[in-house]
Amino acid sequence: MSAEDLEQYESELELQLYREYKDVVGIFTYAVETERRFYLCNAVDLKVRTEGGDVYYEVSMGDAWVWDMYRPARFVKSAKVLTFRDVSIEEIAHSDLQVPKSVGG
């Protein structure tokens, strides 16, 4: 496999992942971003921990979807992340108004 073939393969995987994200984002409540991964989930708990003068974060998530194009299964029942870096947690705003994908007959 050439470098060009590998690049094309990874581009196709990323496009498939983006399409899956668009399909599933509506069923989740939170978006969680760490330095290594992006998650969608319906339950999230962030705890600040200290040990030996170091501060780290423990993020526990339930009913989650993981943005990772190399995972064979992106839906997980629960996930826990420990990190020394920033964690972003956002509540996903769901609009009650759905715009139709196509107009007309």
Image (spheres, rainbow, N blue to C red):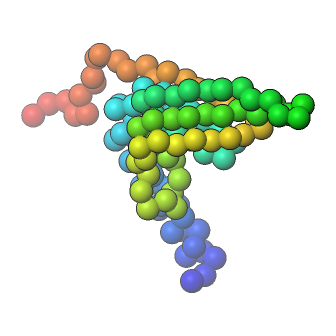
Q: Residue furthest top?
A: 96
Please name the residue shown 42% across and 30% down the image. 42
Left or right of 100? Residue 33 is right
Specify the quadrant of the image occupied by residue 32. top right
Residue 30 in view of the camera: yes
Please name the residue shown 52% across and 28% down the image. 44
- Classify 3 as above or below 58: below
Q: Out of 49 and 4, give the one closest to the viewer.
A: 49
Q: Out of 99 and 36, give the one closest to the viewer.
A: 36
Specify the quadrant of the image occupied by residue 100. top left
- Classify 91 as above or below 57: above
Q: Which quarter of the figure is the N terminus placed in?
A: bottom right
Residue 101 at x, y percent in the picture = 25, 33
Residue 103 at x, y percent in the picture = 19, 30
Q: Residue furthest bottom?
A: 1
Q: Out of 74 and 54, give the one closest to the viewer.
A: 54
Q: Residue furthest left?
A: 105
Q: Which quarter of the figure is the C terminus placed in?
A: top left
Left or right of 105? Residue 51 is right
Residue 19 at x, y percent in the picture = 39, 47
